[in-house]
């Protein structure tokens, strides 16, 4: 059970909203209450922590991510140590699943390799896990490799999972969960993000579909594939060049 003990209105309001939305059991406490024996972890502010005589406390600082704070409380309510496994399904929409101590905590979708990597970096920092493993599917080569390269210098273990060995599902978040629980192969170094000819042609095909009539150049397609520009900007640039 999570105990919420704070006189900080913002923290209380935001925490209650998340706890109720995720249907997590909790109890609201006051500083005059005895802490019930069924409370496993307490959420409070960093300023109020010193007023609480309890071993298992999660503290919130102004500006902290409240969803991550709740995740940490959930994990610590089950174990004193935290082991996190991220499952990542690379693609146009990047599925991310978070397992804490082998239980699914939550899942989400990122829109770019940069957004996925930034989320994971911030999450690991906020949670302060004892052990972190990132498992990423082997599909969508360039998106996969960009995510790996963004994370390779972090103090985490990164594994690639062969997606042909796991069930195929048409849901990015569910696919990420499946990847998180699969066996992976650990990798150590950076990966190439140099686009291949087939990937360039596919991006040019997508530009024709999106714009209805414009095929971006190979140079622009490469920039889209490596994340330098987005497809919309590439189409605008090609349209301007065609009209010049």
Image (spheres, rainbow, N blue to C red):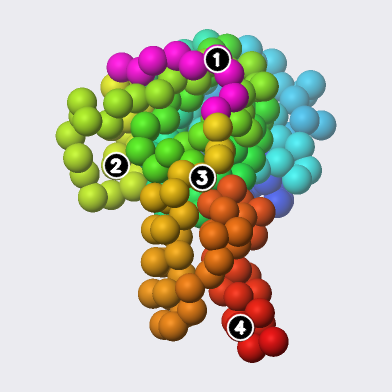
**Tag in front: 1 or 4:** 4
Residue contact at pointers 1 and 3, CB within 8 angstroms: no
Which numbered dot is residue 188? 1
Q: Residue furthest right?
A: 47
Does 154 sit left or right of 175 as displayed?
A: right
Residue at mark 3: 195
Q: Residues within 10 Å of mark 2 (few under 14, many from 20)?
A: some
213, above or below 15, in the image:
below
Quadrant position of residue 101? top left
Please name the residue shown 64% across and 16% down the image.
155
Please name the residue shown 46% across and 44% down the image.
196
Location of residue 114 in the rendering, given as x and y in whole percent from the top left corner: 61, 45
Residue at mark 2: 174
Please name whichever residue, 150 or 11, is drawn nearer the observer in this view of the structure: 150
Residue at mark 4: 242
Disc 4 is placed on an element classified as helix
Please name the residue shown 45% across and 14% down the image.
186
The answer to which of marks 3 and 4 sits earlier in the sequence is 3
The answer to which of marks 1 and 3 sits earlier in the sequence is 1
- Asked if the magenta segment contains residue 186, the reply would be yes
Q: Residues within 10 Å of mark 3 (few under 14, many from 20)?
A: some
Does 42 sit left or right of 77 as displayed?
A: right
């Amino acid at each position: 059970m999570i105990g919420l003990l704070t006189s900080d209105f913002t923290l209380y309001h935001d925490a209650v909203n998340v706890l109720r939305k995720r249907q997590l059991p909790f109890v609201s406490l006051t500083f005059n209450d005895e802490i019930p024996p069924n409370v496993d972890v307490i959420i409070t502010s960093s300023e109020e922590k010193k007023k609480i005589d309890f071993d298992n406390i999660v503290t919130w600082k102004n500006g902290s991510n409240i969803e991550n704070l709740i995740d940490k409380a959930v994990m610590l309510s089950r174990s004193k140590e935290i082991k996190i496994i991220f499952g990542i399904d690379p693609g146009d929409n990047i599925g991310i699943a978070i397992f804490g101590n082998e239980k699914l905590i939550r899942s989400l979708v990122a829109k770019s390799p940069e957004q996925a990597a930034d989320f994971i970096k911030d999450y690991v920092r906020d949670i302060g896990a004892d052990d972190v493993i990132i498992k990423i599917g082997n599909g969508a080569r360039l998106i996969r490799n960009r995510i790996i390269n963004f994370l390779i210098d972090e103090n985490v273990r990164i594994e690639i999972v062969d997606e042909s060995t796991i069930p195929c599902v048409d849901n990015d978040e569910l696919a990420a969960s499946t990847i998180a629980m699969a066996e992976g192969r650990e990798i150590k170094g950076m990966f190439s993000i140099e686009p291949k000819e087939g990937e360039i042609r596919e991006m040019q095909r997508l530009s024709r579909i999106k714009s209805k009539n414009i095929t971006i150049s190979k140079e622009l397609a490469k920039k889209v594939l490596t994340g330098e520009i987005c497809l919309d900007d590439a189409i605008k640039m090609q349209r301007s060049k065609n009209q010049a």
